[in-house]
Image (spheres, grey):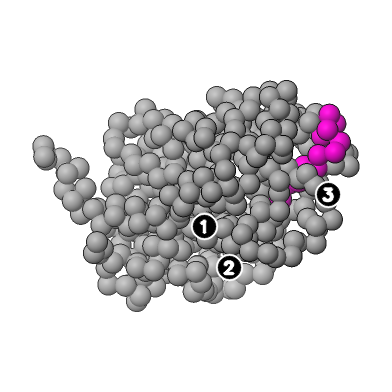
Amino acid sequence: MSYPCYAILALAPQVWHEQWVNRQQLLSRIGRHHSVLYSTGGWFVWDRASDDWRRSAFFGRMENTDNVWVDESPRYLMRWPRVPIVDQLVMRSQVRRWSRWLKGHSGGPLIGQICHPCYAPYLDLLKADYVVYHVYDQYDLMPGWTSELEDLEHRLLRRADLVFCASPMMAQALGRKVPRHIEVLPNGADVGVFLDAATRPAQEPPDLAAIPHPRIGWTGSLHPQLDYGLIATLAQRRPDWHFVFVGSKVKLTEDRAEQEYLRCRELKNVHFLGYKHRRDVPSYVAGMDVNMMCYRLSDQTWIKSNSPLKLYEYLAAGRPVVAANLPSVESLSDVVRVAEGVDDWQAAIEAALTTGGCGTPEQRRAVALENTWDKRAQTLNAWLAELPMARLQRAPGNNA
């Protein structure tokens, strides 16, 4: 299929070179065809106390990496929301900077791709030909959500030519806010690198090699929605099992989560290995005997409506997978064992260690191969190609 070439300004909160999530995975692939400029937006006046601001370039810079250009905002451009006139001037200067760069690198139509409502104020200044709203989490269930962000999200939902999110539950929640068509693009995996790690002989990372088998692993951010209490109980029941967490710890805003996390830290068979670069993660996933998705679920958290990034990575590695009862794994019962409650989790892990769990390694990898990031990017490219027609169909008075 032939795709039009766009200039894409993607605005998202995640620093490009830190933990890769669906924004980086998708943009690095569609950047093979389009001109993509990625930015976390401008600095704020309170960033002057941060090491990142002090290390940044005074006049900013653009770095070409992973098929995209990554923007580092000039240090002198600092937003000041409490002084609207200054804030608008700074945003206007930032948008002019992005627009000049995009015009110099692409002659195609301009897409403003917004990955969080906090970036919506830039749209009025950007004058993009098309607006894409990529919803990667159910934001209104996350800490820090405000009535202002709610209003901005409503405006985005009404304005965007394309809205896509990671799960049907998220699409339903967005549709209740503004009735409109919303595409679903589940998360995927860079399957090839996990297959290589699992099927080619390689030396284990030293910190993992020092941990005895059996290993039950988690790979990803350590956030409050992990069920640390479950892990602590399982670790105490089965001191011969070793629970391994690979990922950086985010601030635990819930007292319960913090206390249960500290309880885990006291146990000799619970291991926290910290953040690992994405190129090293597959070796850790492949080095586990069982991989787990041990979420603490409730209707008030964003986890239940999400599509976990680690799901297809786990399956690509071929190891048994045990997961909390997430809607995103309901259709995968032949390759993922769902567990609820401590006794069920213990039985599920025991079965995975003794009989190989749900499915075979080959069946798990086959499912992963149907859910690669390359295939997800092909779908997104097709949606982008349809933007002109989608605009016509959404035009007032068009009954087609």
Q: Nearer the viewer, residue 43 or 292?
A: 292
Using the image, tell me which numbered label, if any, was put on residue 161.
Answer: none
Using the image, tell me which numbered label, if any, was put on residue 212.
Answer: 3
Task: Name the residue at the bottom extreme.
Answer: 104
Q: What residue is rendered at 83% in x and 51% in y?
A: 211
Q: Amino acid at mark 2?
A: Arg
Q: What residue is rendered at 54% in x and 68% in y?
A: 72
Report the Cα–Cα distance between label 3 and label 1.
28 Å
* First along the sequence among labels 1 and 2: 2
The crowding category of the residue bearing disc 1, from other C-alpha atoms within 10 Å (few below 14, some 14 to 19, many at least 20), is some
The crowding category of the residue bearing disc 3, from other C-alpha atoms within 10 Å (few below 14, some 14 to 19, many at least 20), is few
Label 2 sits on residue: 75
* First along the sequence among labels 3 and 2: 2
The picture places residue 352, in percent across and down from the top left corner, at: 67, 37
Q: Which is closer to the viewer, label 1 or label 2?
A: 1
Q: Which is closer to the viewer, label 3 or label 2?
A: 3
For residue 289: magenta?
no
For residue 278, side relative to residue 188 (left or right):
right
Report the Cα–Cα distance between label 1 and label 2.
34 Å
Q: What residue is rendered at 63% in x and 42% in y?
A: 320
Q: Which residues are magenta?
A: 235-252
For residue 244: magenta?
yes
Q: Amino acid at mark 3?
A: Pro
- Can the viewer see residue 182 in this picture? yes
Q: Quadrant of the N terminus?
A: bottom left
The picture places residue 381, in percent across and down from the top left corner, at: 32, 57
Is residue 194 shown above or below 342? below
Q: Secondary structure at mark 1?
A: loop
Q: Nearer the viewer, residue 208 or 253?
A: 208
* First along the sequence among labels 3 and 1: 1
Label 1 sits on residue: 190
